[in-house]
Each structure stands twice: as C-alpha cells, then as structure tokens.
Amino acid sequence: MNRLYLPFILMLVMMLAGCGIEKNIEYQMEPFTFTDQNGEEFGSNDLKGKVWIADFIFTSCETVCPPMTASMASLQKEMKKKGIEVEFVSFSSDPEIDTPEKLKSFKEKFDGDEDNWHLLTGYTQTEIETFAREEFQTLIQKPQSSNQVIHSTSFYVIDQNGSIINSFGFQRSHFDEIIRQIEKLQ
C-alpha cells in the first residue's frame, strides 16, 4: 500500500520544491514614493531588484540620530571598499520639520555619498508612523510634549523583493554581521 503513494508523494515534493525558485516574486513592501534630500522623488520602484539598508532618523534629534547617521556613512564606505552594491535609505521620523534642504545639510555633516543614499521626507507624521508600523513592525511616535521623536535605532536589511530580512544595531560592532547578510543576498 505504501508503494502506491510513493509516486504521488514524490510528485508533490517536486511541485512544492519548484515553488521556492520563483523568480517573479511580487515586491513585498507596499509601494511608496517620497522626496529625497535633493527634492527628487524616490521610492520602492527605485529599489526593486536591489538590496538596501534602511533606518529612521530626524535632523533635530538630540541623542541617537547623529551617531546612527555617522554609522550609516561608515557602513556605506565599508561597503564601497568591499565592492558590495547596496542602497541606503534613511526615513525621516519628523517629516514636518525635515525638509529636503534640512536632510541634505544634516547628511553633509557625516560625509556620506549621495550616489546610493537617500534621506526621505514628503509625508505626514501619521503616514510615517503607519508606514513604520506596517512595513517595518516598529514604532514611531512624536509626543506632543516634546520636539523629540521616539523611533527605532535599528538598521534594517531589505532584499531585492522588498522583504525585511533582518535588523541589526547601528553600532560598528554589527557591520560584519550586516555585510555577511548582504553578501548572502547577492
């Protein structure tokens, strides 16, 4: 009796194994188009087929955003030195304050290359809070009693299909892990 089911089971396994090699996977992240530090539109269509690293920052941050941005610039340099192609995207968690000009000025303090690093704004506070929660499963909140914004301090690695693969601390001590993760995706 078991031998009768063997061809059926083998055929089922082969069909299911074939599902894992689908190359035309729909982009996983909800489509978005925002404004970068140069006042140009940038979004999910620009990232399709590319591995990217994302974080959330804001220009008037008094605590973690400057070291996060310095770390992003260092990671960008490390990737270029190793010849690893990756895009960098920093979403402003305070879009009503962070104009493209403010984002550009903020980024220039950290010597990052604009060729593959986009700092984004051009949405409302509610939109970025919803986007962060729904796409990154993280919290962004701007309390009415403060000019500071609560946000994630992680670097997120996103694959070519818009799926978040992992998140890491922003500190240099995580660079080797991030690089290994990205090399696996390429």
Image (cartoon, rainbow, N blue to C red):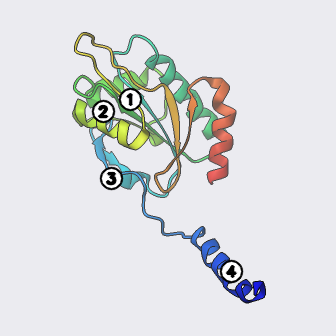
Please name the residue shown 35% across and 27% down the image: 140
Please name the residue shown 25% across and 37% down the image: 127
105 versus 48 height, above or below: above
Return the x and y of residue 105 as percentages of the image width and height: 35, 23
Residue 176 lies in quadrant: top right
In-front residue for pair 8/172: 8
Badge nearest the viewer, 3 or 2: 2
Residue that carries the numbered disc 3 in the rendered image? 31
Residue that carries the numbered disc 2 in the rendered image? 129
The amino acid marked with disc number 2 is Glu
If you read the primary sequence from the N terminus, does the residue marked by circle 3 or circle 2 appear first?
3
The amino acid marked with disc number 3 is Pro
Return the x and y of residue 42 as percentages of the image width and height: 33, 46
Local crowd size for mark 1, using a 10 Å CA cut-off: few (<14), some (14–19), many (≥20)? some
If you read the primary sequence from the N terminus, does the residue marked by circle 2 or circle 4 appear first?
4
Residue 145 visible in rendering: yes
Asked if residue 36 lies left or right of residue 160, the reply is left
Distance between mark 3 and mark 2 Cα atoms? 16 Å
Badge nearest the viewer, 1 or 4: 4
Return the x and y of residue 45 as percentages of the image width and height: 37, 55
The image's mark for residue 139 is 1
Tell me if label 2 and label 1 are in contact, CB under 8 Å: yes
